[in-house]
Structures are given as structure tokens and as C-alpha cells.
Image (tube, rainbow, N blue to C red):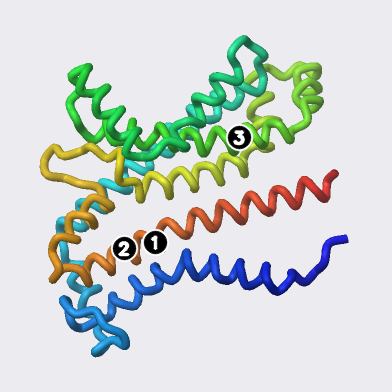
Amino acid sequence: MHSKKAPLPLTIAAFGTLLFLHVPMLIIFLYTFTPDETTYTFPLPGFTTKWFAIAWGRADLWRSLTLSLQVATIATISALILGTLAAAAVYRSNFFGRESISFLLVLPIALPGIVSGIALRTAMGGFDIPFSFWTIVIGHATFCVVVVYNNVLARFRRTSTSMIEASMDLGANSFQTFRYVVLPNIATALLAGGMLAFALSFDEVIVTTFTAGQQTTLPIWIFSQLTRPRDRPVTNVVATFVIIITFIPIFLAQRLSASSSDTEGETK
């Protein structure tokens, strides 16, 4: 039996890790309320919420936010389709080089983002593909596919093949089997993978290459503002917003994965 209470050193280590990961984000949130745009001291010299109003009125911020949401949405939809098809092919088929293909599918998430960005930019430049909205979608979809693929493939491996075989034996065609048997079993994996893919795409910086019309995604907008010290409190406001908007889908995806695992454990 496992002890219900963790040893003290393990508890301290876990608590220290949480502080290391999250204290910087708390500091960013704290300095969204500083009244002085150039001085960062603790305790704060005062308290103000004016930077939220200033950020709300920035037209360039809204353009970047809209672009990031559009890219993340389309990249997520593309990843759901391609990742599910790839997972089904790898799981259902036994062909030469299957493990190599599976490795190549997950490789983009392991590579540094700057490597993927340089590789994509070089490839698109070599084929004379103009940088546009769709080049960002392609770049983001390369690593979003990995998240969906891993989630769906793991769910396929935990799904009994006897249900699929029974459906086919009872006369259901491939589409009916997918709709009534396969899809309900992988639905939570698709939802969790989609939310993770959206969060990753929304805050991705390195593979963003869209510069036409002087439009940038939100992370690139944040980086461009770091060279303007007087705008730093506004940047802190936007960074806090990005943290919140990415925290929500990641949290929900984690809860979905945990609840589905608990359900499967109780069934078994």
C-alpha cells in the first residue's frame, strides 16, 4: 500500500518546484498594478489599474490578439483531423516503417522551436512560398498535430478492438463504426488534445513568420513591446492575459484526461 502522506523532503521539493515555476508569473501579475512605468521596486510605490484601460484601448493589441486566435483555431482544427488520421493509421495498420513514421510524427515537439522555425522558413523560401497567414497556420500545425496524435494514439491503445469487430460483424459500415463506436471512445482524448493544441498555438513565438501588412501574433507583439520601457506595464497586463487564456484549456485538458483515466480504471 502507498503511504497517504508524502515524506517531508519530497513535500519540500514539490513545493519548491511549484514556487520556482509560478513565482515569476505572480511577479508579472503584481507589476500590472504599479503606478510608475519605469521603476520596479518592492513593495510597490502605489496601486493603479490604469494600465488595464490603456491595454484595452490599444488597436494594435486587438489586431494581434485576433490574429493569434484565428491562427490557433485553424491550426487546432487541422491538427485534430491530421493527428486523428495519423493515429488511426499507425494503430490499425501493420506496415514496414511504422515505428519510424511514429517517431517522425512526434519529432517536431522535441525539437527546439527556433530549429523548426528556421527549417520551415528555409523550406518555404526555397519553394518561393510567400509568407502569409497560412504559413503561420502550417508552422503551428506541425507541433499541434503531435499533441493530438499522442492523445488519440494512447486512447486507441486502451480501447478494446472487440467492440469494433462486433460492430463490423453486425453489419455496420466503416463510417457507422467510427461514428457510434470509435468516436465516443476517443472523444475525450480529442477534446483534451484539441485544447492543448490551442494553448500551444496561441502562445507560440518561434515559428511565427507572418509579417505582411505589419501584422503580428500576440507573443510577437509582447516581445516587440519589451524594447519600450514605458510600455512595460501594458506588456505585463497582456502577458497576464496570455497566461490566463492558456491556463484554462491546459487545466481543462488535464482534468479531462484524469477523469477519463479514472473511469477506465473503475470499468476494469
Using residue 246 as the reference point, say whether residue 164 is left or right of it.
right
Coordinates of residue 264 in the picture (x, y in percent): 77, 45
Task: Tell me which corner region of the image, top left, top right, bottom left or bottom right, holds residue 252.
Answer: bottom right
Q: Residue drawn 26% across and 46% down?
A: 67
Q: Which mark is residue 150?
A: none
Q: Is disc 3 in contact with disc 1, using a CB cutoff of under 8 Å?
A: no
Q: Residue drawn 50% across and 34% down?
A: 146
The kind of residue tagged 2 is Ala
In front: mark 3 or mark 1? Answer: 1
Q: Which of marks 3 and 1 is nearer the N terminus?
A: 3
Q: How many residues crowd around disc 3 within 10 Å: few (fewer than 14), some, or many (20 or more)?
A: many
Q: Which mark is residue 243?
A: 1
The residue indicated by pointer 2 is 239
Q: How many residues crowd around disc 2 within 10 Å: few (fewer than 14), some, or many (20 or more)?
A: many
Label 3 and label 2: CA atoms lie apart by 31 Å
In front: mark 3 or mark 2? Answer: 2
Coordinates of residue 81 in the picture (x, y in percent): 49, 29
Q: Is disc 3 in contact with disc 2, using a CB cutoff of under 8 Å?
A: no
Quadrant position of the N terminus in the picture? bottom right
Label 1 and label 2: CA atoms lie apart by 6 Å
Position above or below: 161 against 73? above
Q: Which of marks 3 and 2 is nearer the N terminus?
A: 3
**Closest to the observer, 26 or 202:** 26
Mark 1 residue element: helix
Coordinates of residue 153 in the picture (x, y in percent): 62, 32
Quadrant position of the C terminus in the picture? top right
The kind of residue tagged 3 is Val
Mark 3 residue element: helix
Q: Is disc 1 in contact with disc 2, using a CB cutoff of under 8 Å?
A: yes
Single out the residue that lies furthest toward the top. 96
Coordinates of residue 122 in the picture (x, y in percent): 24, 25
The residue indicated by pointer 3 is 152
